[in-house]
Amino acid sequence: MRELSATQPAVRCRGITRVYHTDSSEVWALRGVDLDLWRGELTLLAGPSGCGKTTLLSILTGILSPTAGDVLALGESLTALTDNARTCFRRRNVGFVFQQYHLLPSLSIGENVALPLTIAGISHRRAQAAAVDVLRQVGLPGVADDYPSRLSGGQQQRVAIARSLVHQPRLLVCDEPTAALDAQAGRQIMDLLKQIASDARRAVLVVTHDPRVFEFGDRIAQMDDGRIDRVEVTSAAPALT
């Protein structure tokens, strides 16, 4: 993976369109989107449901290909890569956090967190050690041997964040990570994501339609009808201490 200079964004989207074709019409999900994500920052992608946020997230991580435009992510042109190369890119460089935690109930917390490393062929001992370490980083020491059903929703989301970080990704993307949580747990999760985003080696993107989380963003990209209307640079919210 290429090293980026301090003046290069972690992700640079230019002229991104995405058109879905049906038998009788075409639907424009994205209409010429330009967006930069910077290392050491938490960027919020905000807008109403159905405005194209999740489609854009899928394109800037290489899950979907744009109809037109280009995505330069961590020095790689994702639109120039094959499907297999994009899969390898995500496996190495991207962590995903979703509204639903997607924890496997039959696995322990430690096994859930270690799963990306286990799939990658890392030894069980190394994977478990890494899982214990990252669980401590997200404020959950001593739970590796427990099971998801024993944890609250906010704690389960912390486990999901730990799983997304265990392979040390350079890009963390979160799709509505607080939507299933109450207000207090949601703030705690945003505090944690803010702390994670302070790492100068990593860019964090949070997709949301909840204005209550806006105070945590370093940048807020407002989206509507498949377009980025504006990007606001904000003052940073205090990190979790």
Image: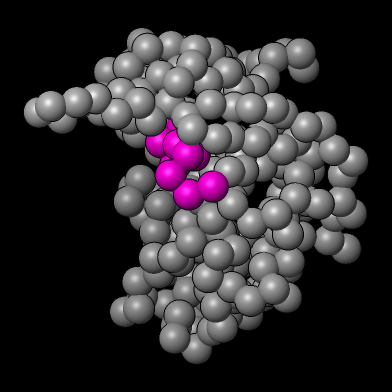
Q: Residue furthest bottom?
A: 150
Quarter location, residue 11: top right
Residue 25 on image: x %, y %: 19, 26
Image quadrant in which you'd find residue 188? bottom right
Quarter holding the C terminus is: bottom right
- As rendered, which of 163 and 129 lies closer to the eye? 163
Farthest left residue in view: 23
Which residue range is magenta in the image? 48-58
Q: Residue at x 63, y 76 (%)?
A: 182
Q: Where is residue 142 shown, x and y percent of the image?
A: 63, 80
- Identify the residue at image location x=64%, y=56%: 210
Q: Is 42 a magenta residue?
A: no
Q: Residue at x 59, y 73 (%)?
A: 181
**Residue 60 located left or right of residue 200:** left
| Residue at the front extreme, as displayed | 24
Question: Compared with residue 55, is residue 197 higher up or lower down, i.e. above or below?
Answer: below
Residue 118: x, y in percent?
Answer: 36, 55
Q: Is residue 90 visible?
A: no
Tally the numbered discs: 0
> Residue at position x 48%, y 16% from top?
32
Coloring scheme of the render? one colour
Is residue 49 part of the magenta span, yes or no? yes
User: Residue 124 versus residue 223: which sits nearer the camera?
Assistant: 223
User: Does the image show residue 83?
Assistant: yes
Residue 157 in which image quadrant: bottom right
> In the image, 43: left or right of 181?
right
User: Residue 41: x percent and y percent?
Assistant: 75, 37
